[in-house]
Image (spheres, coloured by chain):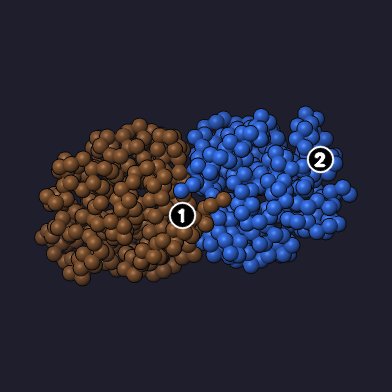
Chain colours: A brown, B blue
Amino acid sequence: MSILVVGSVAFDTIETPHHGRADEVLGGSASYFAVAASYFAPVKLVAVIGEDFPAKEKDFLASRNIDLEGLSVSKGKTFRWTGRYHEDMNIRDTLDLQLNVFSTFSPVLPQSYRNSPFVFLANINPGLQDGVLDQMTTTPRLIACDTITHWIEGARKELEALLKRVEMMVINDEEARMLSGETNVVRAARKILGMGPKTLLVKRGEYGVLSFSPNSVFAVPAYPLEEVFDPTGAGDSFAGGMMGYLAASGDLSEANVRKGIVYGSVVASFVVEDFSLNRLRTLTRDDIDRRYRQFVSLTEF
Amino acid sequence: MSILVVGSVAFDTIETPHHGRADEVLGGSASYFAVAASYFAPVKLVAVIGEDFPAKEKDFLASRNIDLEGLSVSKGKTFRWTGRYHEDMNIRDTLDLQLNVFSTFSPVLPQSYRNSPFVFLANINPGLQDGVLDQMTTTPRLIACDTITHWIEGARKELEALLKRVEMMVINDEEARMLSGETNVVRAARKILGMGPKTLLVKRGEYGVLSFSPNSVFAVPAYPLEEVFDPTGAGDSFAGGMMGYLAASGDLSEANVRKGIVYGSVVASFVVEDFSLNRLRTLTRDDIDRRYRQFVSLTEF
């Protein structure tokens, strides 16, 4: 089954403490999600790019089983973000942000996208995320969303309205604390589950992921890596691998969602091994399955 | 099989952000370790207390299958520590430290302790830890040790000498970084395994434990709790539960060490639910086994 993703396609400039920098490389939540998900299932992408977006990057996305009918080109430049990671790579500063064509982004779904059974609303204004759902002609089997502290602070009402329509939320621990007003992650999760989602996935960077549903908690560590080049996109790649696996199998049982979470963790562990989506340009499905088996031996007792 | 533990018995005064304070309650690395291990195997304790140590606390320890022949009473007061936890309970400040009788502690093993098959050297001066091993008359099946940044900075030579004699080291992530000079935990572990230990357990507080051996990595999350009253002693209780399980089974295979790590995590998850060792005063082995099964469902996929 196919997955619809709505989010950003961007150029990132990344500074790291030990692995140098990368200038104007492919980034954006929808790019990471789509390429990660494409290992498992066909993806339909909705995003906006500027006239400066190179044909070779569009060709790269198209080569990955990603439908680009919903990738619109607007007059102007593509969204750009510049960030610097600290020695502790869980922390980063935004040095520059140029929304460019993204500032007026209002997602319109092509007709062929409107019956997608799996929907991922990557981080954009919650009002726009809500508007995407209004365009669906059939009820999706699974709607998941991400958000950031910017919207939790600035668009809480719209976000709360959205959460009533969403089965799964995928956010990091800082966002979970801010959204719930609770410092303890278990209490935070319980409050957020009370806002609508049936499943909350809390991303904790190098410490892995916690998954909460009303009757179950699942904890999976991050794959321990000797080198983390660039954590950018790890969370969206996690979501992409996880939903890709669910869409491919069509099985939304608790046991299968757990497997999906591990597949997502596996894809994310590869993404951070290089800048941008570079690692995914050579990564194979066999590589993913091999590391999945290593995850089993990492965690079994 | 029995376990020898050498460390501190103390009185702690604890301030917490949300759960009030506790004054002069039973603490110390050897107390936590011994009571945690006593759920699984007989324990022989070596530590020093002052003349002010109440009979009822000695009776409590004795009631838990803990041999107190090695608990010596010195003229003066028992070791006292006062600490304050931050909102983020992974962080604490030491407000006051009175070594008292602990300042001249030089562990002497009773004859009946010298052939203990399992030995845990809790955090004391590495020179003293080394001296404990010199007193053994038979080669233990497993020697494990803890240490703190104070000794890594101030007694590195003695610590490095000790590590050549130790099979297992149990430290937290900050200590692993300082000992190895590496910020990445995988590289830190590889360096520390090069110093002597065959297994390194890295305690990460609410994020769980990573276990490294030359050919294997094992990751276990912490049990997600809604309330953490007092994290004091979690690390020593973890070590106690883990070694207790290994001593009871006598099985040092990789698979069994993993089970031991989970049992240690289970005991630690109870300890933090109340001040001091209070939770262990009522906790039963059945409670432990029940939460062990919850750990299985927390992590299986």
Residue A111 picture location, percent across and down: 11, 50
Question: Seen in the image, is A294 located left or right of residue B24?
Answer: left
Task: Tell me the amino acid under the disc marked 1.
Answer: Ala
Residue at mark 1: chain: A
Mark 2: secondary structure: strand
> Which numbered circle lies on residue B82?
none
Determine crowd level at label 1: few under 14, some 14-19, many 20+ residues with C-alpha closer than 10 A.
Answer: many
* Residue underneath mark 1: A222
Percent position (x, y) of residue B10?
Answer: 72, 39
Residues A235 and B286: in front is B286
Q: Secondary structure at mark 1?
A: loop
Position of residue A40 relative to residue A21, above or below, is: above
Say what amino acid the circle numbered 2 marks. Answer: Asp
Q: Residue at x 24, y 35 (%)?
A: A161
> Do callouts 2 and 1 point to residues on the same chain?
no
Is B196 displayed left or right of A148 in the figure?
Answer: right
Residue furthest to the right? B111
Residue at numbered disc 2: B67
Residue A154 occupies quadrant: top left
